[in-house]
Image: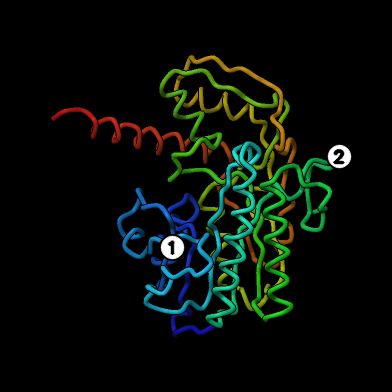
Amino acid sequence: MKQDERGSCSILVTGSSGTIGTRLCERLMDDGHVVAGVDLQRNPWNADVEAITVRGELRDPSLKQLEKLPFIPDLVVHLAAHARVYELVKDPARAQENVALTFNILEYCRRKGIRKLIFASSREVYGNSSTIVHKEEDVRITGCESPYSASKVAGEAMAHAYWGCYGIEPVILRFSNVYGCYDSSDRVIPLFIRKTLANKPLTVYGKDKILDFTYIDDAVSGINLTIDRFEHVAGDTFNIASGQGTQLLDIARMIQDALGGTNEIFTEDNRPGEVVRYIADISKARRLLHYNPKVPIEKGLAVAVEWYSQYASRAKSKKEPA
């Protein structure tokens, strides 16, 4: 990887307008890297990140928009994907698009001679099993619970195929329930915060569901450490999460308590395609990446509630007449 005296390199971030992408671009620029992003959507969160983002349709195999980049990157961080599990259960064609996005980015790397790729995978690849704490080697194709999880398994396989055939070195990072800021989607934490602010009822799918929630800065730290140590970990796979499990019902109650909400909480059965119990074994990331998540769920939720409350207030003030 070409680096200057500061250890910086040129990096392309796909999905740069998303939750992880926005925060990652902020950190990379602060660290002195040369950064460009590509996203189909405008970045609503940070004007500086928007300024370095190219509008690009990654489903287009030509990726002609990437010809507008001011440099050929040393490394690509591929975050772009349809990432809402249940939405892909309802519309599995989006899973096919996830595979196409990854294939197109790998082809871009092959054409441009880019040899370093970080691929954002997911805890969904572990599926449901009798195990609750999962190591990296626990993935089985037969464990795919949804089209989304299958698209991530396929992406991991494709990345390794391009390593074997074309020398493009991948590192696979499996994220889990990243939260904290920069997210207006219906992911569970921002959704619960918005509904509690509006005094609307919360629906918890799976009263016994337990998941590993990862604060955004810890997730981005995992990517930054991978970039810094890429030469030592190329070809490897890591869980990037908190290493702690929290029941989804407790998440709803903690958000309600933090906001002083009185809205009702209902429970329903787990929906098709969803992983029910997952805690990441992060010992490998600790050992090889020196990854050390710093934000426990109680602290992270408090910060997230404050951020989204302020965001809601700003959005409301913009709509009100002067």
The residue positioned 79% from the left and 40% from the top of the image is 128
Q: Which of marks 1 and 2 is nearer the N terminus?
A: 1
Q: Which residue lies furthest to the left in this view?
A: 322
Q: Residues within 10 Å of mark 1 (few under 14, many from 20)?
A: many
Secondary structure under the numbered disc 1 in the rendered image: strand
Q: In this view, does 114 lie to the left or right of 99?
A: left
Circle on res. 126: none
- The quarter in which the C terminus is drawn is top left
Label count reads 2
Q: Mark 1 points at which residue?
A: 38
Q: In which quarter of the image is residue 111?
A: bottom right
- The quarter in which the N terminus is drawn is bottom right
What amino acid does circle 1 point to?
Val
Q: Position of residue 125 (x, y in %)?
A: 73, 50
Depth-wise, is mark 1 or mark 2 nearer the camera? 1
Q: Quadrant of residue 168?
A: bottom right
The residue positioned 56% from the left and 46% from the top of the image is 178
Circle on res. 130: 2
What amino acid does circle 2 point to?
Ser
